[in-house]
Image (cartoon, rainbow, N blue to C red):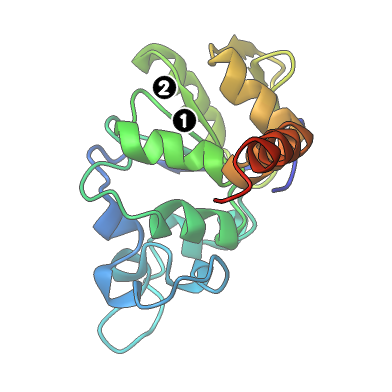
């Protein structure tokens, strides 16, 4: 998993509440178990019309936000079903950080497992960042995980809280498999001792 340390990028404003996982990646696209290739269908029903043409007014279709790496969203982001394809699609599109007043628990935890930093902030702090994001591609934010800060294009610093273990995993690029592999020597030692104690197994 890619490490997350400091990100400087364009932030796209999406002030919608209750954006659920079916809006993020519709069930039509859940036929794959690959983490790549889903970005083109991120927010599919909001990005494209029935004929597959882009809807110009949707934020990620606007020229200034096509390269967005940060998403500033409304309350209860990632609610609905627990599909892991939702963070896969977000990451594959190129978004590394989502900022919102609150997240659905399963989506929030899945973000960390896929190298995405979800930041929960009070509404008034999100409003500050939303306003900054609305400036377009010239307004780049800085997300510093080590310092636990988001800096606006005007230099205003917003601090955020994060679980220490989740922070460690993102900084080191550790997903569940990598965490298990860290224990490889201890596992091998246990297996060797167990084999010697019970050779009949």
Q: Are dots 2 and 1 in contact, CB under 8 Å?
A: yes
Instruction: Decide if residue 102 is on the left or right side of residue 72.
Output: left
Q: Quadrant of residue 101?
A: top left
Across and down, in percent, residue 199 comes to 63, 47
Residue 200 visible? The answer is: yes
**Which residue in the structure is indicated by mark 2?**
127
| Pointer 1 local density, CA inside 10 Å: few below 14, some 14–19, many at least 20 | many
Instruction: Decide if residue 76 is on the left or right side of residue 149.
Output: left
User: Which of these two is toward me, 8 or 111?
Assistant: 111
The residue depicted at 29 percent of the width and 52 percent of the height is 21
**Which residue in the structure is indicated by mark 1?**
130
Check the image and report above or below for 31 versus 63.
below
Residue 39 marker: none
User: Which of these two is toward me, 75 or 56?
Assistant: 75
Across and down, in percent, residue 30 comes to 34, 72
Q: In the current view of this chain or complex, which residue is farthest to the front?
A: 200
The residue depicted at 66 percent of the width and 30 percent of the height is 169
The residue depicted at 28 percent of the width and 41 percent of the height is 16
Element at label 1: helix
Q: In the current view of this chain or complex, which residue is farthest to the bottom?
A: 51
């Amino acid at each position: 998993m890619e490490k997350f340390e400091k990100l400087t990028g364009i932030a796209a404003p999406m002030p919608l509440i209750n954006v659920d996982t079916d809006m993020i990646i519709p069930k039509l696209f859940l036929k794959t178990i690959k983490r790549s290739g889903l970005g083109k269908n991120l927010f599919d029903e909001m990005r494209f019309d029935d004929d597959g043409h882009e809807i110009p007014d949707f934020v990620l279709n606007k020229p200034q936000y096509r390269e967005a790496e940060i998403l500033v969203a409304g309350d209860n982001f990632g609610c609905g079903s627990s599909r892991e394809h939702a963070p896969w699609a977000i990451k594959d599109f190129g978004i590394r950080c989502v900022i919102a007043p609150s997240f659905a628990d399963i989506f929030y935890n899945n973000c960390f497992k896929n190298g995405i930093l979800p930041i929960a902030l009070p509404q008034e702090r999100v409003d500050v960042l939303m306003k900054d994001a609305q400036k377009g591609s010239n307004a780049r934010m800085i997300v510093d995980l080590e310092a636990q800060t988001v800096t606006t294009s005007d230099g205003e610093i917003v601090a955020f809280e994060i679980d220490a273990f989740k922070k460690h995993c993102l900084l080191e690029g550790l997903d569940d498999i990598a965490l298990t592999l860290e224990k490889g020597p201890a596992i091998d030692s246990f297996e060797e001792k167990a084999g010697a104690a019970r050779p009949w197994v």
